[in-house]
Amino acid sequence: EVIRPLERPVSDAGALAVLRGNLAPEGAVMKTSAANPRYFHHKGPALVFDSPAEMMARCADPELDCDENTVMVLRNAGPVGAPGMPEWGGLPIPKKLLAQGVRDLVRLSDARMSGTHYGSCVLHIAPESAVGGPLALVQTGDVIELDLPARRLHLHVDDAELARRRAAWQAPVSPYQRGYVRLYQDHVTQAHEGCDFDFLHGREATPEPTIS
């Protein structure tokens, strides 16, 4: 009952899935064995948070505008943005929804997941928001679609509007201007490249954050 035979797996969806789309051009990871099948194909409005502190404060608000269709988004949690890509991927269910019995939501982040992570979370989104990845352009209310069978993560915003947002986007200012953390932020690669130092591979980091 604990270690199942292949003909009777815990999950028919597999353990992990790599998703791609206009929100994750270089990929994202979903732990499908820990997700609710009802969210394997889901479309809902985004609820965006720019930091864990903001997220925790707003999720405690009983008047937060959200429901079971909401797609929670935490950004600035990747290798450069956090910095260090911490295990912030287990975004909390808002207090209002917990009181209604909701125990899972689609949740997106450029953060990392742990081995004990649970829920319908899409993480390791690359490129991350802090270097101008598409996650930086998402606004609360935008419609996001997760299609697990198609391995797709899509932001339903037209190209002209995304171009307008790109032009207005500014990279977050790092409080680290020298020392190891500054070195790390300047030279760490993105999640799909292993969060390694670029100079260990004979490459130079991009001097300015850009949106691809």
Image (cartoon, grey):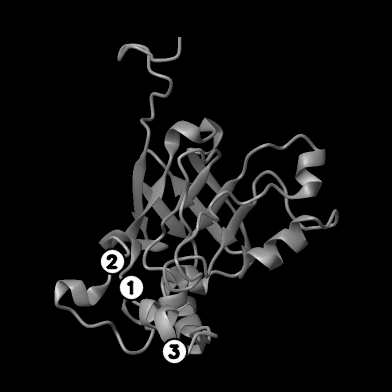
Q: Are marks 3 and 1 in contact (CB under 8 Å)?
A: no
* C-alpha span from label 2 to label 3: 19 Å
3 or 1: mark nearer the eye: 3
List the residue tagged with mark 3: 178
Specify the farthest residue to the right: 62
Specify the farthest residue to the left: 202
Residue found 38% across the figure and 61% down from its top: 24
Picture quadrant of residue 195:
bottom left
> Residue 15 location in percent, x, y?
37, 33
List the residue tagged with mark 1: 188
Residue found 85% across the figure and 53% down from its top: 62
Q: Is residue 150 visible?
A: no
List the residue tagged with mark 2: 196
Picture quadrant of residue 193:
bottom left
Of mark 2 and mark 3, the one earlier in the sequence is: 3
Image quarter (top left, top right, bottom left or bottom right) of the N terminus:
top left
